[in-house]
Image (cartoon, rainbow, N blue to C red):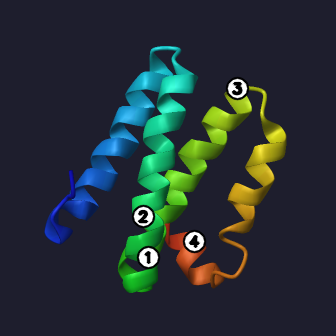
Amino acid sequence: MAVPEQHRPGRADSLVSLGIRLWEQGRPADALLAEQDAVTISRELAAADPERYRPDLANALTNLSISLLDLDRPVDVLPTGRSTGSWPPKILASSVPG
């Protein structure tokens, strides 16, 4: 079922939250599925409005990387991290708390 455009940011956020909850329950394989969907949506949103959605994409990619590491798939983390390689430092810094 297609998600209306105005609900896509909320769906991405919900998938990130679902991934976190599943990971906390010791279910990284299930978390991975939610996180992959969150990254897909977040990439599309960031492509359309980078200033608004790149921090969300960075967060989704971080969570995906954690699950990949928990599943002993460190080789798959490298391409995930490269997704942010061309981002300005200002954008990356805005997604880091502190």
Disc tally is 4
Disc 2 packing (10 Å; few <14; some 14–19; many ≥20): many
Amino acid found under the numbered disc labelled 1: Ala
Amino acid found under the numbered disc labelled 3: Leu
Task: Determine the image quadrant of residue 7.
Answer: bottom left
Q: Please say if the residues under marks 3 and 1 sit with CB atoms less than 8 Å apart.
A: no
Amino acid found under the numbered disc labelled 4: Ala
Residue 81 at x, y percent in the picture: 72, 59
Identify the mark at residue 46; answer none if there is no mark: 1
State the residue at coordinates (66%, 70%). Answer: 84
- In this view, 8 is above or below 47: above
Amino acid found under the numbered disc labelled 2: Ser
Question: Which residue is denoted by mark 2 in the rendering?
Answer: 42
Specify which label sits upstream in the sequence, 4 or 2: 2
Cα separation between marks 4 and 2: 18 Å
Residue 90 at x, y percent in the picture: 57, 82
Q: Nearer the viewer, mark 4 or mark 1?
A: 1
Cα separation between marks 1 and 2: 6 Å
Q: Please say if the residues under marks 3 and 4 sit with CB atoms less than 8 Å apart.
A: no
State the residue at coordinates (48%, 30%). Answer: 31
Which residue ends up furthest to the front in the rendered image?
A: 1
Specify which label sits upstream in the sequence, 3 or 1: 1
- In this view, 62 is above or below 90: above
Disc 3 packing (10 Å; few <14; some 14–19; many ≥20): few
Question: Which residue is denoted by mark 4 in the rendering?
Answer: 93
Identify the mark at residue 71; answer none if there is no mark: 3
Identify the mark at residue 89; answer none if there is no mark: none
Is residue 12 left or right of 71 when viewed as pictured? left
Specify which label sits upstream in the sequence, 4 or 1: 1
Specify which label sits upstream in the sequence, 3 or 2: 2
Q: Please say if the residues under marks 1 and 2 sit with CB atoms less than 8 Å apart.
A: yes
Q: Judging from the image, what secondary structure is the residue with disc 2 in?
A: helix
